[in-house]
Amino acid sequence: MLKAIVVLVLSGLWAVVLVPPAWRSLSRLTRSGDSIGTFSRKMSLLGGRSGSTLDLTGADLATRAPARRPAAAPRASARKRRRDVLVGLLAANGFTILLAVVAGGVFWMLWLVSATLLGGYVTLLVQLRKAAVEREMKVAFFPQQAPAPELATVRPLRRVGS
């Protein structure tokens, strides 16, 4: 009976950890059902323009600024991922301490493992935050340079006289 409870608890903990990422990836797959529209959006992003033809002659490649991905999007998704993991570890820790108080025995060891994992994860989060703050203090970005003027608008100087 005790082995069945331990297996049930462990499978519940694994479900808490594995089901949310699988659910997000499944919902992401079902949302992108319009393959033609997705292809068109990706091609317009690749060309740097929406709804226009791509000039392959290279005439305007020098004047076009490189497309930059917004830096806030990856940070927001990482922050959400870290929050989800932290909530999962907190739930597992709460569940195992409840089982340890009610049933005792092996569940105290399970709670100890859960608490150690939670403590280690919180320590890693604190170290990441300290490194990010230190990086923000030390790194200074250079100002953006203005794009080069188009070649068609630059006129060479005319020589006057002999």
Image (cartoon, grey):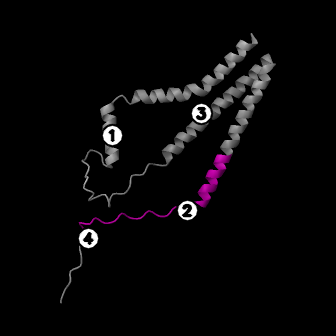
Towards the viewer: 161 or 134: 161
Q: Quadrant of residue 85?
A: top right
Horizontal relation, residue 64 to residue 96: left or right:
left
**On the image, numbered disc 3 is attached to which residue?**
84
Q: Is tag 4's residue or tag 3's residue first in the polypeptide sequence? A: 3
The secondary structure type at the circle numbered 1 is: helix
Outermost residue toward the right in this view: 105
Q: Residues within 10 Å of mark 2 (few under 14, many from 20)?
A: few
The secondary structure type at the circle numbered 4 is: loop
Q: Is tag 1's residue or tag 2's residue first in the polypeptide sequence? A: 1
**On the image, numbered disc 1 is attached to which residue?**
41
**On the image, numbered disc 2 is attached to which residue?**
140
Image coordinates of residue 12 in percent, x first then y, are 64, 20
Quadrant holding the N terminus: top right
Q: Is tag 1's residue or tag 3's residue first in the polypeptide sequence? A: 1
Q: Is residue 118 above or below residue 133?
A: above
Outermost residue toward the bottom in this view: 162
